[in-house]
Image (cartoon, rainbow, N blue to C red):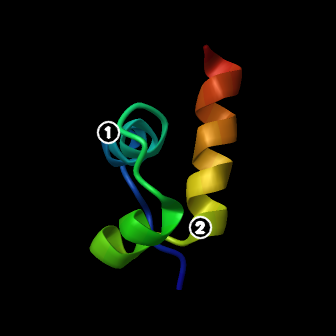
Amino acid sequence: MPQNYTPEFKKKIVRLHEEEGRTYKSITAEYGVSKARISKWCRELCEEC
């Protein structure tokens, strides 16, 4: 069953990775979001800017 994430949550995860330098592994361990999903969100948010 797909999980729905709020836009605010997605932005928080992207910020952790892009601005704070957190690794995919550490974010996955803390928030349970897959590396593929984090990567996708980063791409999507970069395209918006």
Point out the image quarter for the C terminus. top right
Residue that numbered label 1 is attached to: 8
User: In the picture provided, is 11 more to the left or to the right than 47?
Assistant: left
Most distant residue in the top direction = 49
Residue plotted at (71% across, 23% down) = 47
Most distant residue in the bottom direction = 1
Residue plotted at (40% across, 51% down) = 22
* Rendering coords of residue 27 (x, y %): 39, 64
Residue 20 image-quadrant placement = top left
Residue plotted at (67% across, 51% down) = 40
Residue type at the position of mark 1: Glu
Residue type at the position of mark 2: Lys
Q: Secondary structure at mark 1?
A: helix
Residue that numbered label 2 is attached to: 35
Residue plotted at (64% across, 20% down) = 48
Residue 27 vertical position relative to residue 20 in the rendered view, above or below? below
* Rendering coords of residue 6 (x, y %): 36, 48
Q: CA distance from mark 1 to mark 2?
A: 18 Å
Count of labels in the image: 2
Closer to the camera in the image, 48 or 24: 24
Instruction: Tell me if mark 1 has few (under 14), some (14-19) or many (20+) residues whose alpha carbon lies within 10 angstroms of its own.
Output: few
Closer to the camera in the image, 43 or 18: 18
Query: Is the C-beta separation of discs 1 and 2 under 8 Å?
Result: no
Q: Secondary structure at mark 2?
A: helix
